[in-house]
Amino acid sequence: QDQVRKYKEQDVLLTSNCWGFAWEVLFQADNAGTSAMTISTADPTSAWRAFTGPGFDLVQSSRTQPLLLTDRQRRNQKTQPGDVLLIWHQNPSTVSGEDLYLDHVATLIDEDVYFEKSGSGDRVPFRVNTWNGLVANFPPSVFFWEWRRLVRNNPLSTTLYGSAQTRVQPAQSLF
């Protein structure tokens, strides 16, 4: 009965997961002055499509550059604050290599320092985490690590000019 009363009397219950939170960080930064706010718990496939879609460029990936996971200087050489880190694994039953699962998303703040929601639910913290903390939760021997950047924040992007998307869209329009 007390649990029911707690949720009934609560003004807002914020339930989000890591990729919904990371998307909202980008949305709020990109749409200054907006009164819109979306708390999303999208499925991993929709989130993967959003973060790897036309508005984002691949900066680097441990799939093609495994040394990124052990060489700090190499890992941080191409990244910049605001990049998103996608951590994923490939399901072993897949023959075609297309079946992957997005496990985690974090937003880069500075060299090897990330802002994240460490899971989903209203009791899971929003936090600043380090590279060592991420590696402890997602062992590089199991997961692939991929850094992505918004196209318009990437002056070297081959898709920057002529891109129709000018702002990050609200999560509800994508997830």
Image (cartoon, rainbow, N blue to C red):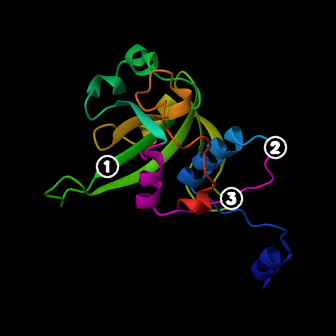
Locate residue 128, reporting x and y percent: 63, 36
Q: Can see residue 117?
A: no
Residue at 58% from the left image edge and 26% from the top image edge: 81
Q: Is 41 left, or right, of 71 in this rendering?
A: right
x and y percent of residue 72 in the render? 42, 18
| Spatial separation of the CA atoms under disc 2 and disc 1 | 37 Å
Looking at the rendered structure, the secondary structure element under dot 3 is: loop
Answer with mark 2 or mark 1, whichever residue precedes in sequence: 2
In x, y percent, where is residue 25?
65, 43
Which residues lie in the magenta part?
33-54
Residue at mark 2:
33
User: Residue at point 25% right, 31% down?
Assistant: 64
Q: Identify the residue under disc 3.
A: 38
Q: Is residue 149 above or below residue 79?
A: below
Q: Report the residue that reaches farthest toward the front.
A: 162
Residues at circles 2 and 1 in contact by the CB criterion of under 8 Å? no
Element type at marker 2?
A: loop
Q: Residues within 10 Å of mark 1 (few under 14, many from 20)?
A: some
User: Going from the N terminus, do you reach mark 1 or mark 3 first?
Assistant: 3
- In front: mark 1 or mark 3? 3
Left or right position of 2 against 153 = right
Q: Amino acid at mark 1?
A: His
Q: Is residue 50 magenta-colored?
A: yes
Name the residue: 58% across, 54% down.
20
Disc 1 secondary structure class: strand
Q: Image quadrant of residue 82?
A: top right
User: Where is 97 relative to 10, above or below?
Assistant: above
Which residue is under mark 1? 89
